[in-house]
Amino acid sequence: MSMLREKLENTTEQVFTAEFPSVDGGGMARVEKNAARLAPWFDAVNATDNPAAHAHTSNTTTAIAMKMYGLEPIMQIVCRDKNRLAIQSDMMGASLHGITNISLLTGDDVTAGDEPEARRVFDVDSAQAINIARILATGKYLSGRKIDPAPDFYIGAVENAAAPPFDYRIQRALKKHRAGAQFLQLQICYHPDRLEAFCKGVAEVAPDLKLIPTVVLLKGARGLSFMNDKVPGIDVPVGTLARIQNASDPSNEAYKLTLELATHALTLPNVRGLHVTDFRHDHTLEDLMNDLGQTPRSSITNR
Amino acid sequence: MLKKLLPFIEHVIKEPVWDCRMCGQCVLHSTGMTCPMTCPKTLRNGPCGGVRENGNCEVKPEMQCIWVKAYDRTISLPLPKVWKEHYNELRPPVNMQLQGTSSWVNLVTKRDQQVPGGWSVQDAGH
């Protein structure tokens, strides 16, 4: 049962999603601690798949662990590390454990990570992987072999609204929607005008496609320039960077920027909520959610 | 003999012009005459999210993203309308068994149109 699907498809309520911190050690206690921090605020949380091309605890096992501690996972699968067989077995494994939300991504290249000498796979691309998830949900593998009963998936994907070729990003969103994606989490975007153009364009061609833009909580200008320089596909305008750098209280100014971007994003067509990435790990996550009119969910229910 | 000769001839012609990788299932016509197999991630269905602000590749910063190029060319080149309309179609996964074979032969024999048994595409008005 996907509460994310329930909320996105059958209500008009806003949804909030987050990224589950990568697990490298510390066992279930670490998972429990992170889950407790996120559970009050988020409807569903991404179980990532070797983000930024760094090896971590696997997507499926992380998603299972998250579920044990009351979080609803959105299990990501990237195309970089697995061929079509492994991608299908990831999806089926997720289904075995009652994980319904899956999100298919291209994935950062191996050169973005700490093992650039690795072989990159990309046997299928994200649009194909989305379509494969849809095919599995109709009761067959890519080969045509029957699956009975068919797994239940709520399929999502990711798109970058602010990377070239700008006009084409809307068509690409439509392509992913036609392949089977019901919601798109959007890459971090520091160009509100681009985000606005994208959302308006998507609303025209794919009115049913739910959009969840991302905002990031950062401590100051250093994090911002790191993203601008190091994270593929993210551009921070010079003026935005200068605004934080020159502020008397950069930390507060960075928070104000995030709140502005979040408030703007929530006004855009087809936007049904926000994905919040927290690099601050301080009170500002609570501040942001409060400032956006959210109240903590009272208790963790067993999902 | 012809079976060996054709891939050779195809490669000699297409390699210098399009940097052809002999995937054996050519889609050049639908991608603005830009080969998607030259994308470091061999993406067949459009650009990844890592395209740089200047339109260059995430993996090879000195190279223009092949999907930026494909999009520009699809708009600007005087290609047949039906080719341009194929630009945003969902291309199936590459058949690795056709690697190194002649896409010309595969086009004639329709081998390049064979898809996995379970593959299906939702129509535009789903």
Image: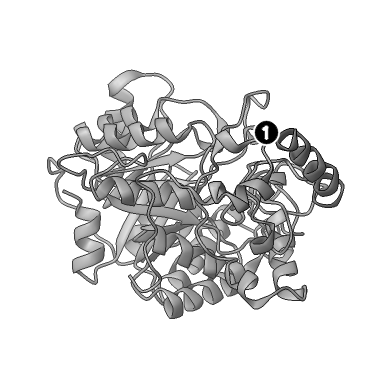
Q: What's the image's color scheme?
A: one colour
**Is residue B86 or residue A43 the one in the foreground?**
B86
**Where is residue A202 drawn, in percent x and y?**
46, 73
Could you tell me which residue is drawn at 20 percent across and 32 percent down? A68
| Number of residue marks | 1
**Where is residue B98 drawn, in percent x and y?**
60, 37
Could you tell me which residue is drawn at 63 percent across and 54 percent down? A234
**Image quadrant where one finds the C terminus of chain A:** top left
Height in image: A3 above or below A9?
A: above
Residue farthest to the top, as pictured: A26
Residue A283 appears in the picture as rendered? no
**Is residue A249 or residue B12 the one in the foreground?**
B12
Identity of the amino acid at label 1? Thr
Residue B58 appears in the picture as rendered? yes
Could you tell me which residue is drawn at 61 percent across and 52 percent down? B107
**Image side of residue A189 versus residue B76, left or right:** left
Height in image: B80 above or below A186?
A: below
**Is residue A196 or residue A78 the one in the foreground?**
A78
Question: Where is residue A54, by image quadrant?
Answer: top right
Crowding at dot 1, Cα within 10 Å, few <14 / some 14-19 / many 20+, comes out as some
Residue at image mark 1? A111
Could you tell me which residue is drawn at 25 percent across and 55 percent down? A4
**Is residue A35 or residue A77 the one in the foreground?**
A77
**Where is residue A287 drawn, in percent x and y?**
38, 57
**Image side of residue A201 versus residue B30, left or right:** left
> Which of the chains bears the disc numbered 1?
A
Question: Where is residue A244, by image quadrant?
Answer: bottom right
Say what secondary structure mark 1 lies in.
helix
Height in image: A230 above or below A212?
A: above
**Where is residue B27 drawn, in percent x and y?**
64, 55
**Image side of residue A212 versus residue A252, left or right:** left
